[in-house]
Image (cartoon, rainbow, N blue to C red):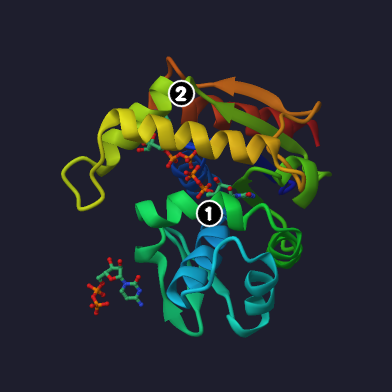
Amino acid sequence: SHKKIAIAIDGPAGAGKSSISKVVAKELQYLYIDTGAMYRAVTWAVLHEHLEVSNQKAVEALLPSLDLTMEPTDTAFKVFVRGEDITDYIRQQKINENVSTIASYKGVRQYLVERQQAMASVGGVILDGRDIGSVVLPNAELKIYLTASVEARAMRRYLEVKGTTNEQSLEDIKISVMQRDKMDKTRQESPLIQVEDAILVDSSNMTFDETVDYILHLVREQIEHE
Ligand code: CDP
Ligand code: CDP
Ligand code: CDP
């Protein structure tokens, strides 16, 4: 059958979720939704407005005025705040350092989860994040928990930013990735967990292409089941 399913991909920072989801979505002609970009966009706005990141009430009060919109295309997932495309600004270190605090706020999560579910309702979707299998799409036909050792994940991030204005030492990246993982796994609201019905994929010793092929294999197996 050619039923279009919903695919949920969760896991820690730098596991390959977004880069792999993008390729898998393209191959299947599915819609890719980068939920991390949405938490990053809110964080960008909070910093841009010079709000106190620790001030949950002020952060949550800002949400309705952001006019946060998303534009998923074949090649990118763009985020806009008040009509401005801020996609190029959301991967900076300053955002990395603050996004997990912003993502720990219940009001922020409710606001974004609602939008993610609305976007996913078209079917034939792949969403990546931390709470997709547990909260956003609890009925997804395929759930994957994509992970890798912290050394492998830090190295991948290091190679990505090396030679750019966001360059950082491998050790600093490792520390920052570990801090973010810890916050995401221990927060009260929708912590990062591997849900019972998720398939564990550890890509520590897999190349990018091997990981894509393996996930495509899992998807096709599931689609045949439907
Ligand atoms: O790309 P990377 O894995 O570094 O991060 P991301 O997927 O862009 O997510 C950035 C941050 O947003 C995460 O560290 C979480 O704090 C938060 N997040 C979340 O709480 N729930 C999601 N569904 C997606 C991201
Ligand atoms: O979204 P997430 O934070 O989970 O990771 P990502 O930003 O998609 O991937 C981080 C980097 O790891 C990217 O540069 C990927 O090309 C790379 N990667 C890899 O080298 N080998 C894999 N098996 C998976 C991802
Ligand atoms: O903002 P400006 O026109 O001076 O220059 P840009 O080349 O567009 O952006 C330079 C840097 O400013 C970006 O890498 C962002 O760090 C930051 N920026 C931002 O965060 N938000 C904006 N609305 C514009 C710039």
Task: Determine the secondary structure under disc 1.
Answer: helix
Q: Residue furthest left?
A: 163
**Mark 2 vs ligand 2: CB under 8 Å?**
no
- For marks 1 and 2 on the same chain, the one whose residue lies earlier in the sequence: 1
Quadrant of picture, ligand 2:
top left
Residue 150 circle label: 2
**Mark 1 vs ligand 1: CB under 8 Å?**
yes
Q: Amino acid at mark 2?
A: Val
Q: Name which quarter of the figure residue 216 lies in.
A: top right
Contact, mark 1 vs mark 2 (Cβ under 8 Å): no
Is residue 200 rendered to the left or right of residue 161? right
Q: Position of residue 147 (x, y in %)?
A: 55, 26
Q: Is residue 222 above or below residue 45?
A: above
**Residue holding disc 1:** 99
Is residue 181 rendered to the left or right of residue 19? right
Note whether residue 79 is visible. Answer: no
Q: Residue furthest right?
A: 139
Is residue 98 rendered to the left or right of residue 186? left
